[in-house]
Amino acid sequence: MPYKTVEVTTRSHRKAFHDFPRRLYRDDPNWVCPLGNEVEAVFDPARNPALRRGDASRWILVDEKGVVAGRIAAFIDTLRSKAYRQPTGGAGFFEVVNDKEAAFMLFDTAREWLAARGMEAMDAPVNLGENDVNWGLLVEGFMQQGFGMPYNKEYYRKFFEDYGFQNYFEQYSYHREVRGPDNSITWFPERIMKIAEWISKRPGYEFRHFEFSNSDKYVNDLVEIYNDTWSVFKDDFTPLDPAHVRETMRKTRAFMDEDIIWFAYYKGKPVAFFILYPDLNQILKHLNGKMHLWNMIRFVWYRATHKMTMMRAVIGGVNPSHQNSGIESAIFLHLYNVFKRKRWYKELELSWVGDFNPRMMAIYEALGAKKAKTHITYRYMINPNIPFMRYKDEIAAGVMKKEGNKN
């Protein structure tokens, strides 16, 4: 069937961009419609710091009758692009009917747009911004996703791989019941509990949960820990932008729980953090992507009656000087004490951890969590003369480079 792409430039185009997934997933109970305003924020420089230093465009795909058959967005974050071995852009918000021709036309559109702007590789499906939301293609675990974790049609994987996208890295989501069938709390093994108690009592260590009244301090502490932690992975590491963290805290304040965001300090220096959010998707599934007055009232009621029973671990980090110290266990001990008080929390999703981070996978498994979902971040080499490398191979190459410099 003949298709054509239409760049989203008008109000009616934007409406079609948002309405298409509602039609595509209307019979799928696992799909949760995102808030349209939050999707629009990605394409608004006033609300997305990444766009202020980059560029983006998006398209809908229509058939010969004018019926929308797909959509895609392409974007360049100049800071992130420069951090890779080659200039690299991204494509995301991909949705399409079960038609290879339609899918390939969307991929072509994004690739050509990026190539015209000097990009030599394309990552997809990704977000314009940090990778804690809308990042990766779901390939295993087709259940209702936690807030921020993408859900998609199973047939998308074949489209990506047939087009020539390659597996850049895999992202795993682990699940752990917080309470048993009788609502009694269940937690991690006794051995880890003992380590946690020992660390918590060691001189010099302090543990505090996040407080909005002192949010600037905690944002700065988070950025310091994160940058210290992740800069050891790659020579071309891109530092976390404090503006992004502040914007995230602002957007999530309506459903955030301060008691499940924890920081660890050693002699006053921030050394570790772990962020959990209540699963907003347990409310959003009732709102159809719209936040008008009636849905605002419903939102307040759902939150007040504790309809968010699952939590998602969004991000964490431990300063390299304190890794392998057991400090993660101490943070989980403080969370355990919170869960004893807040009996509505029943399940924990630990997502996501990359296949390049076996240490964190081992921690989650030691806590008794089981791998439940897999997403893949793909990379397409626009410049075929540049060899493809998986992310963990890039990390290994970066480590070898550092060691060579030391010698």
Image: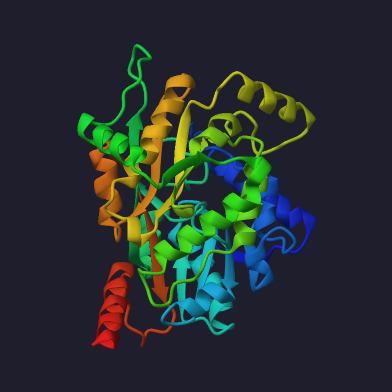
Q: Is residue 70 visible?
A: no
Q: Is 213 situated left or right of 30 in this image? A: right
Q: Is residue 329 above or below residue 179?
A: below
Outermost residue toward the left in this view: 191
Outermost residue toward the top in this view: 182
Residue 367, horizontal then vertical, whole percent: 27, 37
Residue 163, horizontal then vertical, whole percent: 39, 68
Residue 190, horizontal then vertical, whole percent: 22, 29
Number of marks in the rendered image? 0
Q: Is 383 situated left or right of 92 in this image? A: left
Image quadrant in which you'd find residue 117: bottom right
Residue 373, horizontal then vertical, whole percent: 34, 43
Q: Is 196 situated left or right of 262 in this image? A: left
Q: Is residue 52 above or below residue 351?
A: below
Question: Residue visible at 34% across and 46% down?
Answer: 327
Residue sitting nearer the eye, 316 or 290? 316
Residue sitting nearer the eye, 305 or 281? 305
Residue sitting nearer the eye, 357 or 16? 357
Question: Residue visible at 57% across and 63% down?
Answer: 128
Where's the C terminus, which quadrant? bottom left
Question: Residue visible at 27% across and 32% down?
Answer: 193
- Rendering colour mode: rainbow
Q: Is 164 situated left or right of 208 in this image? A: left
Question: Residue visible at 36% across and 33% down?
Answer: 333
Image quadrant in which you'd find residue 50: bottom right
Image quadrant in which you'd find residue 359: bottom left
